[in-house]
Amino acid sequence: MAFKPANNIQDLQYFGEFGGVNPSISDSSTYTFLSAKTMFDTFEGNADGCYLYSRHSTPSNLYLGQALAAMEGTETATVTASGMGAITAVLMQLCSAGDHIVSSRTIYGGTYAFLKNFTPRFNIETSFVDITKLETVEAAITPKTKVLYCESVSNPLLEVADIAALSKLAKKHNLKLVVDNTFSPLSISPTQLGADIVIHSLTKFINGSSDTVGGVVCGTQEFIDNLRNVNDGACMLLGSTMDSLRAASILKNLRTLHIRMQQHSLNAKYLAERFEKDGLKTVYPGLESHTSHELFKSMMNEKYGFGGMLTVDIGSLDKANALMELMQKQNLGYLAVSLGFYKTLFSAPGSSTSSEIPVEEQKEMGLSDGLIRFSIGLDADIERTYTMMNTCMKELDIL
Ligand SMILES: *Cc1c(COP(=O)(O)O)cnc(C)c1O
């Protein structure tokens, strides 16, 4: 496996036009051609190394795309203006009217809303299933199914998908397995386990500084070319292209991802173990009590750990809200959605990021009112953080 750059970051070598140690940013929306013939060839997709118009691609976007493709071990990648810009483009590219998608029911709220409310307008229907039950997944597949969709570690319940087994199912029924790997960059490498297409919201861990939205689609050269095709490519025609300035800034943040992921994982594991010992209902894939602990272990790139996300069920929304407000007051983190920041972020997904999912369905999938989702930060002294969180919980009679 030729993984780079995130764990072989020193191998990444893109110079600026004056020998700068960072690649130059292509600050142009359009590009000149020396001959009219080359312009025609580029439109036809036959002129390698030539740029046309920045909605199609730019040197800065290609640098970032190549780096992320190397990280996921795919032939290539294309970067998008947001994670949703990647997800919606991929699904619209793979499906036509009359097609069917089988998706995990515990997915990002925006993806759920897109599949539940938006794609039916184009006669693309989705069956939502418990992705951990392979028989249920297979039973939902029909002759019209084109895509099997899941998150490697699901939002917000932290269910783990058996990517190798799902890939076998996908191959058997001639489907594309699309995996959103936003929660577990570096820890899990879905294409190495058989996924066809890997998506990330770069907004989260990969960029890591909560200053931008961004996304990426990693896949074969053929599929990425299709997405960017001027005649029928979803990225090209729906316009979810990333801006060059952003691509350049995300590439710089990518260089510290391996260190950040190790620290997020270390801190999250420490807190999860302590919370569980205190008797709190804690979900973290790194805990032996997690139903998919062994599965995660069998898939993971060990060095990066079990990731920075954990959930705790405090029992009621009122208590969860009180705890989050108190923790924020003590500067232990921020009451905010999103994840992958240097500070710990917490929110109650039932009433925020997963509020697109109807209450009855939330109940059925085990998403309770009192659930707090934590994205654990890069705290240098996590023992101190734990002690302070423990004090907050005692103050509110949670412990
Ligand atoms: C945030 C998120 C998305 C959407 O990404 P944006 O960059 O906000 O568009 C998709 N999937 C997961 C798992 C996410 O956490």
Image (cartoon, rainbow, N blue to C red):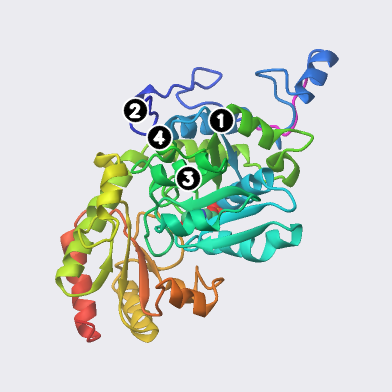
SS at badge 3: helix
Can you identify the residue that label 1 sits on?
220
Q: Which percent across, then down, holds residue 3?
A: 38, 28
Occupied quadrant, residue 313: bottom left
**Is 68 inside the magenta-drawn segment?**
no
**Mark 3–mark 4 distance (CA, rounded to whole Å):** 16 Å
Mark 4–mark 2 CB contact (< 8 Å): no
Residue assigned mark 2: 8
Q: Nearer the viewer, mark 2 or mark 1?
A: 1
Query: Percent position (x, y) of residue 98?
Result: 73, 53
Instruction: Name which of mark 3 and mark 4 comes first in the sequence.
Output: 3
Disc 3 and disc 4 in contact, CB within 8 angstroms: no
Q: Nearer the viewer, mark 3 or mark 2?
A: 3
With respect to residue 40, does 304 lie above or below?
Answer: below
| First in sequence: mark 2 vs mark 1 | 2
Relative image position of residue 212 (x, y in whole percent): 53, 51
Residue 216 shown left or right of residue 136 in the figure:
right
Q: Residue at x 73, y 46 (%)?
A: 238
The stretch in magenta equals 26-32
Q: Which mark is residue 169?
A: 3
N-terminal-most mark, 4 or 1: 4
What amino acid type is highlighted by mark number 3?
A: Leu
- Classed neighbour count for the residue bearing mark 4: other residues with Cα under 10 Å, few (<14), some (14–19), many (≥20): some
Other-residue count near label 3 (Cα within 10 Å), few / some / many at <14 / 14–19 / ≥20: many
